[in-house]
């Protein structure tokens, strides 16, 4: 038995003895869990045990893809009742009543409108009709989603707003156990603060199990951190101060977000602050903008979703698009990709995009797009085929060359070993990296990315930034929607601020790194 298993077993035995003596009740637990996805050779979990006393607030922390969300689904009863995955265990105790918030809020909704979604919960709890609207308003206010009209189509909400709605619907259940799978991943900093304040205010004596990468708002609130290794084993289990003090090197090696991780990231790359921009490859025409907008409007139906009076993007620009949830940031990228109808002047590489009425065609060989929801862009049955599909679209390569380049790309984005898995079977973080890989591999003139670092551990978030910088240094213009203040400070050449459906400000980026990132070598790996 390893030391980590001995510690876990000892703590579990202590908890069980305490429960027997009436000192505390166990809310959820599992003993000797074994789980393996169909078609996979490796176990996600092999004899993992965890016990959580009633009222405890526990953070499950570990690198992307280590099985945190899967364990939460097991403890919450979703596996195998709803998600059919073979598993074995010696013993399991599931919550008597639980509320689950998924990573992807769209998978959680049953009804098309906000009020109907919340009413569905209240009807099941037999709440009187006259009491429903006040309770809906109260729950939405707790999560910072203050809608003038409750009968709003859910599809019109941004992903961040949807995530708040998902949490509000769970709060209306008033469950004994809250199971939260990255509930703040898609929110701006103020939204993250509001979500965790809401969770704290309603948690009380409830048991709370949290899977989260960005832990700044909760690290001083949780009672306990369970630290996972990449293979799904438990490395440590203890108080937050103990974990961050004793296991700092382990956190760093496994790419886990911890206080000070951005500073360590800068230090490890040996960069200087306030350095000049990395020079572009020869041949890039800096005088001609790759994107030029004048009186540009993106529409949802007949309603303007985003308006841009005037803006230009040049080769080698790294534009960080910031603003609160629902401001129109995603609508801006969708409009630039012509996935929303548009009006006004739009030039791509000096060429006016034209079409009938509001419908124009955007050349996919010159501009690429990474959706906020990665599943929107998957078209193939395996991870390797998904990446190869983008290269086949580019043309000019043999089948062997396509497969070789696709495999190199998957290694770059830490997806090797997952080539045969269906894209929908990946973790949220892995799905996101695959969506970035399939778009970036084509090397277009412009790459639009909508929240590419959400759901990522630190190592993979930095790998995505490094790869974007590699593309930028070779002339590709990067336009990235982000809630990460550090990206604007470290990497952006410009910061565009979007508020209330308008591009309201364009400011110089922080650009604090010199030589940030490095160009991919001949094998496609990011070096440096």
Image (cartoon, rainbow, N blue to C red):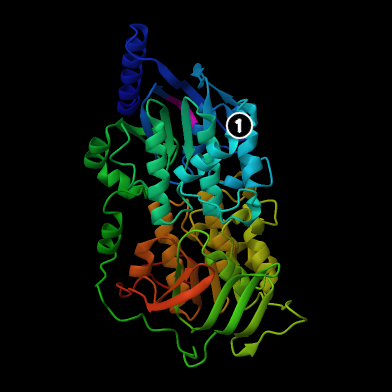
Compared to 47, does 130 lie above or below? Answer: below
The mark tally for this picture is 1
Give me the residue at 39% from left, 55% from top.
Answer: 189
The residue indicated by pointer 1 is 122
Left or right: 242 in relation to 133: left
- Magenta span covers which residues? 42-49
Using the rendered image of the protein, determine whether residue 67 is visible from the camera's viewpoint: no
Using the rendered image of the protein, determine whether residue 9 is visible from the camera's viewpoint: yes
Left or right: 64 in relation to 149: left
Give me the residue at 65% from left, 62% from top.
Answer: 388
Q: Viewer-proximal residue, 507 or 440?
A: 507
Residue 31, quarter of the rendered image: top left
Q: Position of residue 465 (x, y in %)?
A: 42, 65
Secondary structure mostly seen in magenta is strand
Location of the C terminus by quadrant is: bottom left
Q: Viewer-proximal residue, 237 or 115?
A: 115
**Could you say whether the residue bearing mark 1 is in a helix, strand or loop?**
helix
Q: Position of residue 128 (x, y in %)?
A: 62, 28
Q: Position of residue 3 (x, y in %)?
A: 30, 26
């Amino acid at each position: 038995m390893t030391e980590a298993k001995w510690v876990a077993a000892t703590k579990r035995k202590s908890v069980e003895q305490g429960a027997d003596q009436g000192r505390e009740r166990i809310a959820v637990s599992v003993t000797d869990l074994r789980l393996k996805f169909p078609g996979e050779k490796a176990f996600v979990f092999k004899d993992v045990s965890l016990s959580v006393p009633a009222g405890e607030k526990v953070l499950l922390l570990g690198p992307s893809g280590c099985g945190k969300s899967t364990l939460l689904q097991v403890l919450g009863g979703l596996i195998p009742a709803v998600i059919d995955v073979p598993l074995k265990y010696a013993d399991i105790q599931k919550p008597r009543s639980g509320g689950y918030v998924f990573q992807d809020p769209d998978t959680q909704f049953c009804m098309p409108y906000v009020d109907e979604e919340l009413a569905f919960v209240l009807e099941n709890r037999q709440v009187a009709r006259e009491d429903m609207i006040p309770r809906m308003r109260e729950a939405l206010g707790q999560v910072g989603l203050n809608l003038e009209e409750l009968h709003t189509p859910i599809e019109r909400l941004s992903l961040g707003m949807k995530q708040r709605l998902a949490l509000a619907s769970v709060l209306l259940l008033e469950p004994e156990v809250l199971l939260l799978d990255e509930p703040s991943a898609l929110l701006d900093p103020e939204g993250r603060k509001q979500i965790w304040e809401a969770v704290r205010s309603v948690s009380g004596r409830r048991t709370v199990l949290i899977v989260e990468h960005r832990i700044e708002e909760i690290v001083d609130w949780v009672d306990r951190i369970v630290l996972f290794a990449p293979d799904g084993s438990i490395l440590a289990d203890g108080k937050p101060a103990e974990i961050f003090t004793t296991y700092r090197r382990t956190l760093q090696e496994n790419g886990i977000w911890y206080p000070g991780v951005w500073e360590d990231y800068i230090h490890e790359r040996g960069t200087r602050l306030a350095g000049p921009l990395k020079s572009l490859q020869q041949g890039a025409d800096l005088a001609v903008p790759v994107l030029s907008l004048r009186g540009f409007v993106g529409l949802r139906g007949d309603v303007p979703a985003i308006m841009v009076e005037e803006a230009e993007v040049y080769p080698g620009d790294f534009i960080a698009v910031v603003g609160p949830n629902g401001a129109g940031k995603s609508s801006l990228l969708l409009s630039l990709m012509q996935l929303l109808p548009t009006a006004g002047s739009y030039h791509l590489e000096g060429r006016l995009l034209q079409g009938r009425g509001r419908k124009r065609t955007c050349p996919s060989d010159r501009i690429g797009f990474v959706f906020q929801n990665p599943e929107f862009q998957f078209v193939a049955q395996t991870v390797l085929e998904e990446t190869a599909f983008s290269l086949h679209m580019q043309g000019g390569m043999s089948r062997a060359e396509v497969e070789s380049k696709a495999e190199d790309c998957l290694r770059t984005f830490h997806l090797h070993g997952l080539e045969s898995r269906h894209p929908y079977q990946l973790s949220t973080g892995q799905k996101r990296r695959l969506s970035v890989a399939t778009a970036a591999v084509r090397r277009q003139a412009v790459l639009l990315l909508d929240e590419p670092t959400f759901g990522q551990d630190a190592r993979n978030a930095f790998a995505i930034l490094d790869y974007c910088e590699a593309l930028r240094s070779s002339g590709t213009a990067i336009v990235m929607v982000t809630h990460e203040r550090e990206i604007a400070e470290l990497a952006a050449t410009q910061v565009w601020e979007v508020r209330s459906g308008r591009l309201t400000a364009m400011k110089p980026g922080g650009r604090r790194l010199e030589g940030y990132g490095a160009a991919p070598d001949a094998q496609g790996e990011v070096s440096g």
